Image: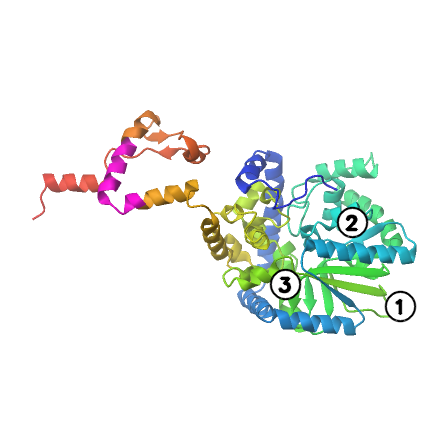
Amino acid sequence: MSDHALDPRTAAPFPIIAAKAVADSQLRKNVRHATDVIQAKRARVVGELPEWQDLRSAGEAIRRHSMATLSENLQRFEANCIQAGGQVHWARNSEEANAIVIRLVTEALHRFEAQPEVLKIKSMTTEEIGLNRALERAGIHPYETDLAELIVQLGKDQPSHLVVPALHKNRQQIREIFRREMGLTDLSDDPIELAGAARLYLRERFLRVPVAVSGANFLLADTGGVCVVESEGNGRMCLTLPKTLITIAGIDKVLPSYSDLDVVLQTLPRSATGERMNPYNSIWTGVREGDGPQEFHVILLDNGRTDVLADEHGRQTLHCIRCGACQNACPVYKQTGGHAYGSVYSGPIGAILTPQLMHLEHAQSLPYASSLCGACYEVCPVKINIPEVLVHLRHEVVLRKSSFAPEAVAMKTAGLLFRSERRFRAAQRLGRITQRVLEREDPTGERWVSWLPGLLGQWTATRDLPGMPSQTFREWWEQRDQKEPRS
């Protein structure tokens, strides 16, 4: 378990963490290579579908309808899940969710007289609530069974991507983690050998541990089923082998109908991993004697989602199906990786989801972690207009700041100057006089300012500022008129 959890409440602002991340050339190389590979695979399989844009529009409509009827869908899911033999629990926040899981796991382990261990399927929701740390504080050891999550767990690291949590590690680094944690001194960095080592490590635990915790890609309101898609088969084993299965899902994961999977199971794998279809698509509905877990719990987590839903501009954030395509396309994420966001949700979707889940009391720097280039919107399979939400959140952040904050004072001063031609011209003259002590001339005769004092120095810390011209366009035009009066 990492000693440095990604917690937006305690994380430093994005620019501070990002500055350290971009200085790590190996990290940038790993992230760029991985995202480029996934993007190329995505482009290939998306290009196979002439109706791709229609699928995106259909996905958007499904998710918009799901959120518009969320209350009804959740009640239908609860009723159908219970009718199928499942048990449904409601958690307002991460503390309640963790407490429910620990109680259920403890009761199950006591019944089975088993060791204090639990299997886990990759789940960003359990990362969001810090479940692993809560389990370990309760004396229960969680085993991550997804290969990337296993790498993160054994490396005492944190996930840096929604779909590929260990994307920031290369295979040489993974070999060292496995050598150290599994005692495999002769292990090579061959991918097949690394996967084989993980398989052997996990297989014994799959057969021994009687309780598993999963997330959910989708909840199906009309059947009470839970849909989990994955590529490794670990999820299928966790869903079928244990005697007790506990699923934790955000309330935004619900879909009105089983038939909605027809669209999202085409767009999700193509957007997430560049696959036409996930190798393993599991839908688990209730309990059936002699088939899989005989005890099935679903915990429905709010943790700020109803407040996001109440915001007409920000609610489209809840349409996200966690494919990570926006992360792979984002020029900022490609430079910094995921840890710079100080949250388990990184990249463009993290920049809008985390501040809203934190009620903008934390992570206020994340809406600015974007160039607003729009690449995230272009690849989103459900057409979330992330740039639009980013601008909305920036507005909300500004409203929450003091009127005496440096940025607010700077904007008010600029407004004061722009409202008066006389004041604006005076400021231009003052700027030209001041820059004489700061500017330098390059070999081509161009003048540049390489250093500015105070907060203005954040601009010149990474780039030079062109020197102000000796004459403005307006001054040149007026001078021209004096020399050549217009008829």
Question: Does the residue at mark 1 contact the one at mark 3 (Cβ under 8 Å)?
Answer: no
Question: Compared to 172, does 126 lie above or below?
Answer: below
Q: Amino acid at mark 1?
A: Gly
Q: Which secondary structure type mostly characterizes the magenta part of the structure? A: helix
- Numbered disc in front, either 3 or 2: 2
Percent coordinates x, y for residue 161 in the rendering: 64, 48
Question: Compared to 41, does 450 lie above or below?
Answer: above
Question: Does the residue at mark 3 contact the one at mark 2 (Cβ under 8 Å)?
Answer: no
Residue 26 appears in which quarter of the rendering? top right
List the residue tagged with mark 1: 290
Percent coordinates x, y for residue 205 in the rendering: 86, 50
One can see residue 381 in this view:
no
One can see residue 268 in this view:
yes
Query: Mark 1 or mark 2, which has the lower sequence index?
Result: 2
| Residue depicted at x 24% and y 45% | 420
Q: Nearer the viewer, residue 419 or 250?
A: 419
